[in-house]
Image (cartoon, helix red, strand yellow):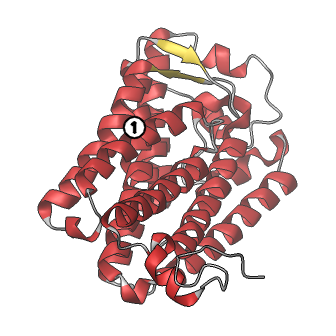
Amino acid sequence: RSLFVVLRVLYLRRIGLSEEVIDEINGTRLDLPADWLPKLLADPRLKTRIKICDVLFRKGGHVVTLTSTIIFNALLVSDLGALVLSVSLGSLLLITIQATAVWLFNGPEHRAKWRWLSFLFGAADRIRDGRLGQQNAMMGSISMMWGIVASFGIALLGLPPQEDAEKLWALSTQLVLLPLTYGDAMGEIIGTPFGRHRFKVRGLGEINEKSLEGCAAVFMGSLIPGLIVLGSGAADPDAMPAAWGLVAVIAALTTLTETIAFRSTDNFVIPACNAILVVIWWHAAEAINGDDPAFDLANMSDTFRSPAFGSTPTLVLVE
């Protein structure tokens, strides 16, 4: 993502921003006056160009990072748990370094240092978040780290072991992560420059709003990649009962959670809720088909029989 820092600086120079303003954007911003962002966005033409900048370099890095993780898992890694652990530890280390840099080098006297320290954030500090740009970026990284860990933990608890259901795990991984990768990104890519029907939301930043157009883009950006995965054979649709319907439900759930989640926490809420849905969907389908041991009363009655009722199937508590 270091490349995105370089590209953002070049873009900001191209649209006419001074080196002083670029240094303020790349720095901590906490020391900047309260009217810094409103003044920066006062020119409608410049405001549009800064929106484009945030879309290209913040969400561009988001898509590249998560896409590479999905590809890495699909092609090179057989142990999903090892991948989750390595990504989580790497994210934790990076966030710790970012927070330390913000704490140690906060203030106008350190502005020049941020020409290099800004590489720690990889252009993820959205300009339109104003003075809280770096804090929003760090919160987003934290929520993504815990979102991936939580979704993996939910799958461990609710799905068959990975070694016994490799196709199910391969499909479930993509169904959980693809909406976070593309649905979430499309919401900003479409909603930021083209959104007209806007509404306020809660979040960490100076501008907290979404649009109906962005919500529609989240839905389509979650639905289409899932359909492509199923239709192209990248994952086996037979591994999950009614997989085509599940893709549509996940797209709807992702749209809801991305909209109502506190801004910068959706990276946790989206994968965690999608993982819960996948587990519930699988168990419900198995129960309907009579294949889920959790709902197999015949097997349970073979194991536990009540002396009072003989061979009548009876559910008992085992302490």
Q: Quadrant of residue 39?
A: top right
Q: The disc labelled 1 sits on which kind of residue? A: Ala
What residue does disc 1 label?
A: 252
Against 262, residue 92 (above or below) is: below
Q: Is 157 placed left or right of 160 in the picture?
A: right
Q: Is 113 placed left or right of 74 in the picture?
A: right
Q: Tally the marks.
A: 1
Residue drawn where x is 79% and y is 20% of the image: 34
Q: Position of residue 293 (x, y in %)?
A: 46, 77
Q: Position of residue 61 (x, y in %)?
A: 45, 52
Q: Position of residue 50 (x, y in %)?
A: 48, 27
Residue drawn where x is 57% and y is 79% of the image: 86
Q: Is residue 72 visible?
A: no
Q: Is residue 36 visible?
A: yes
Front residue (pair 24, 150): 150
Front residue (pair 24, 89): 89
